[in-house]
Structures are given as structure tokens and as C-alpha cells.
Image: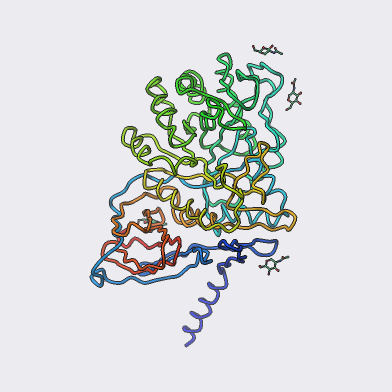
Amino acid sequence: MLKFFSVLILVACVRAKYEDKPCASKQIPGESVVCVCNATYCDELQRSIPSKDTFYVYTSSEGGLRFQKQPGTFEKSDDFSKFHFVLHPKKTYQKIQGFGGAVSDAAGINWKSLPPKLRKSLIDSYYGIRGLEYNMARVPIGGSDFSTHPYAYNESPVNDTHLTNFTLAPEDFQYKLPMIHQMLGVSKVPLDIVATTWSPPPWMKTNNAFTGYSRLRKEYYQTYADYHLKFLQTYKSEGVPIWGITTTNEPINGVLNLAPFNTLGWTPGEMGEWIVNNLGPTIRNSEFKDLNILTCDDQRVTIPLWFNILIMEHPEALKYIDGIAVHYYTDKFSPADILDLVTKNHPDKFILGTEACEGSYPWESPKVLLGSWDRAKTYVTDIIKDLNHNIVGWIDWNLCLDSRGGPNWAKNFVDSPIIVFADKQEFYKQPMYYALGHITKFVPKQSYRIAVETSKTSVKSVAFVTPRNTTVIVMYNDDDKTTVNIKRGERALQLTLAERSIVTLEMYNSDT
Ligand SMILES: *[C@@H]1O[C@H](CO)[C@@H](O)[C@H](O)[C@H]1NC(C)=O
Ligand SMILES: *[C@@H]1O[C@H](CO)[C@@H](O)[C@H](O)[C@H]1NC(C)=O
Ligand SMILES: *[C@@H]1O[C@H](CO)[C@@H](O)[C@H](O)[C@H]1NC(C)=O
Ligand SMILES: *[C@@H]1O[C@H](CO)[C@@H](O)[C@H](O)[C@H]1NC(C)=O
């Protein structure tokens, strides 16, 4: 009896230790719900560790479920006559690098506009063990359009080949570095940060301006490589290690004058020349020799240019390039097979998604669409598709924005998974936030994608084995409520997927 009571007390103690906090939901008319976080409340989810005989299912839906957690038990596989998903944990594909969001000035400004407790909740929501467990981030080197004005480091003196006046900007000290330090403090795993230049100081460019048609002046090829090295040194001295750099944000913008914001145009040939003669040797001969160098950093459709043509004209660039960075904005219009060709021809190069957001197309209005389930769907189906085409990770754009989708000096307002209301001292977690979390929280770095055989193609899916010794499948059902049978080895289970829902299933690997 005593034993029974002590077990009860023990269970009660364990229970009392941590309880998930549900979404404080707010229905947006005509859309789905957002979850409201304020100084005293913010929803939280702790991943439950499945035992040998159980699994956990997490559901978010247009109807308003957010990370609804349910345990389940297995059945024998011969109880079912048909399976919709058969998982093959021994047939593995790419190794996962991770997931994250970007510390733009705009994100930092919005984060800073909140009281300290809410700032912490916001970072916990993304990087904490009760949040999305992000392990990556992207940070602009200098300004981007998501700044209050265009700027770069060492803008003066001009023609300063040796960068004698390279210092960080007020934005680094006020917003970006403090935000990153809080992320580093919260994260239980090392943070892999990708840094990217949008535009160098105008004096390095042929048009002497931040925007418009431009090229790097030949006499500053080495200076621009050194500019990156100085950034790495300076951030390191501020306690922020950088995991990778890209070879300039969206080079096509400065070639075709596609964007009203900070750009630098590169032809593939010129960029190849710069990587081989300047950037590559500068990095590899420095203390940052193990840094990841990612090229392209532009839309998927541009891979044939800023990767294929670049390495055709300058094959030696392959010696320096670790991976290819791709952006999201043409995914709807371009086949993902482009990604498969990279993996097939260059199995030693990885592909990482480095930027994505909704609301960026000129015809999309409003830019911030509160409660939009359609945007959550676009996010999760894009990530599932990318992962099925060998992408090793996916970095979202601004971690948070204001209700207008800014600030952005070039008025290029867009949506974000977290929208901050400084006046009300609240932030809203959009459906997109949960769409990301259904993958990021359950698929840590060093997971491997595995094969899934499926006869139910209306449900999008992707599956992994993880270093947590679990198998995870993420599904998106865009239809009415539907029942699916899932099999992994001898274990089988049946799930009912809610109407228009994202479902993550995690089970222990009985064979490890
Ligand atoms: C914060 O949110 C909680 C949960 O929705 C609510 O009960 C509380 O009243 C809110 N506090 C303030 C100050 O708005
Ligand atoms: C060096 O840069 C700072 C801004 O970071 C600027 O105020 C100062 O004038 C620059 N010095 C020179 C000599 O241009
Ligand atoms: C900087 O270099 C450009 C291009 O060579 C030149 O036109 C300009 O006069 C130079 N400016 C100064 C202050 O030396
Ligand atoms: C996973 O399994 C391996 C081999 O049995 C074991 O060494 C490791 O500690 C396990 N890891 C976790 C997170 O359970």
C-alpha cells in the first residue's frame, strides 16, 4: 500500500514538474486562429519521449488545434489489410543540418520593442526546449531591406582598400547581437549561424549605390573577401561564432535590377573568379578555414546559373564550395528536380534553404495575413517537398515583424510566423509558426531522411530516423478528416488525420 502511494506521489511530482501550456487562441474572422503571448502567458510544448510500446502524435489544424499531443499504442501489422504509409528506416537519404530563422534588423527591432520577459518568451518560442528547438539562424552582414535605412560597414573613408575603418553598426549592438546572445543562452545545442552580405559599401561597386544594376569593382575583389573575414573576426570577438557564409544575397537582383533594395550583381563567371582567387583562399588560409561556404543564395531556378555555369567556367571553385543555398520565392513555379540533379552530380555538396517568407509577391495583400492557414499549408508543403528533394535544412526569413510586415526601408513588407504588437505588449504566433515546428522540433540535426512508401498521395509526407533513436513522420492532409494505416517493421498503427491538418508522429526505434 505504502509502495502504491509513493508511486502515486512520484507520478504526481513528475506531473507537476512540467505541463504543456496550450495556445491562448484568438479566432481571426475568415481565417484560422493565432496564439497570443503576453507578459504572463505564452503557449509551450515539451516533446514527450516515446517508450518502446508507445508513440506520440501532434496535430495542428485549420480548425484551431495547435500542437495537440496524444499518446498511442501499437497494433500488430497483420491486423490491417492495407497500409497507406510504410516506413523504411534502413533506406536513408540526406543528413539533416537543421532549421532556423533570421536575425534581421527588423526582427531585432520588434523583439527589442517588447518588455524583457516577452523578449525571452519570443526567443524561447523558437530556440527553447519548449519551443521549436531551432538550431540555425541567418544574419545579414550589415543592412538588408529589413533595416530602417541602407548601410554597410566601412562606408567611409571611400576607396579604403584595406578596410581601415571596419566597425560594426549601431544595429549590431542594439538589436542583432543581443538577440543572438539570448538565442545562444536558450539553445540546448550549438547554434549554426549563416551570415550573408546584401550589399558592400557603395564605393566597392560600379554604380556607387546600394541598389540598382551593379558589379563589384575589379580593384576591390580582394577587399570584398577581406570584408567577410573582418566580419567573422568581429562577430567572433563579440562571442558569436559563424558556421557559414553565402557568396552574396540573390546576385540576380543586381544583374537584372529586380529589387528596390540592397543588392550586388554578379555574373556566374565573375563570382566563380572571385571565389577561386579571393574568397576561397582568404577563408581557407584564415583561422576560419572550416567555415562553410555556400554559393547561389538565390532562387531555386537560378541553380543552373550560379552553380552549374559558375563551376563550369571555374571548376576550381568546387574546391571551396561546401554547399548551395536556395531561396523559396520561385518554388511554386520551378521543379524540385533541379535539386536532385545537384545531389546526383555533386554528392559531396549539400543544399540548404536560406530564406523563405509568405506575402512577398506584389499581388499578395495584406502582406501580414493574421491567422492564415493557407500560408501554414504553403510553408509545410514546401518544406516537405524540399526535404524529399535532399535539402538538409530550411531557414525562415525574419523571426518576427510588426503588423505591417516591417520595418523595411524599401517598403518590401512581408509576413512572419511571429507578429509583434509593441503597443499592446503582445505577440501572435501565426499558423506558419506551428507549421515550422511540426518539423523543426522533431527532426534535430543529424537526423536522416528515410524512404516512405505511400499509396495515399493526397497526404504529403516525409520521414526520418533521429539521433534520439526515434522514427518521425510528418504529414499534411489538405482534405476532410481521413484515416491512415502506418507500418514500421512489425509495428503498425492507425491514425485519424483531422481536416486540413499537419500531423507529426514520433515512435521509438525498437530495433536500436
Ligand atoms: C495574458 O494572457 C492570459 C492568457 O490568455 C490572460 O489570461 C491574461 O489576462 C493576459 N494578461 C494581460 C495583461 O493581458
Ligand atoms: C569611420 O566610420 C565611422 C562610422 O562607423 C564614421 O563615423 C567615421 O567618420 C569613419 N571615419 C573615417 C575616417 O571616415
Ligand atoms: C574613389 O574611386 C573612384 C573610382 O576609381 C573615383 O572615381 C573617386 O574619385 C575616388 N574617390 C576618392 C575620394 O578618392
Ligand atoms: C540511442 O541508441 C544508442 C544505441 O543503443 C545509444 O547508445 C544512445 O544513447 C541512444 N540515444 C538516445 C538519445 O537515446
Q: Residue furthest bottom?
A: 1
Question: Which residue sits at x=39%, y=26%?
Answer: 318
Q: Nearer the viewer, residue 298 or 272?
A: 298
Left or right of 374 on screen, residue 150: right
- Looking at the picture, how far across and down is residue 452, in whole percent? 31, 55
Res 75 quadrant in image: bottom left
Q: In this view, does 179 lie to the left or right of 435?
A: right
Residue closest to the eye, 473 or 116: 473
Q: Which residue is drawn at 45% across and 23% down?
A: 268
Q: Is 78 on the left-hand or right-hand side of 473?
A: left
Q: Which residue is drawn at 28% across and 59% down?
A: 455
Q: In which quarter of the image is ligand 2?
A: top right
Residue 264 in which image quadrant: top right
Residue 96 position (above or below residue 156):
below
Q: x%, y% of residue 70?
A: 45, 70
Q: Residue at position x 57%, y 73% from top? A: 16
Give the side of residue 198 with respect to residue 481, left or right. Answer: right
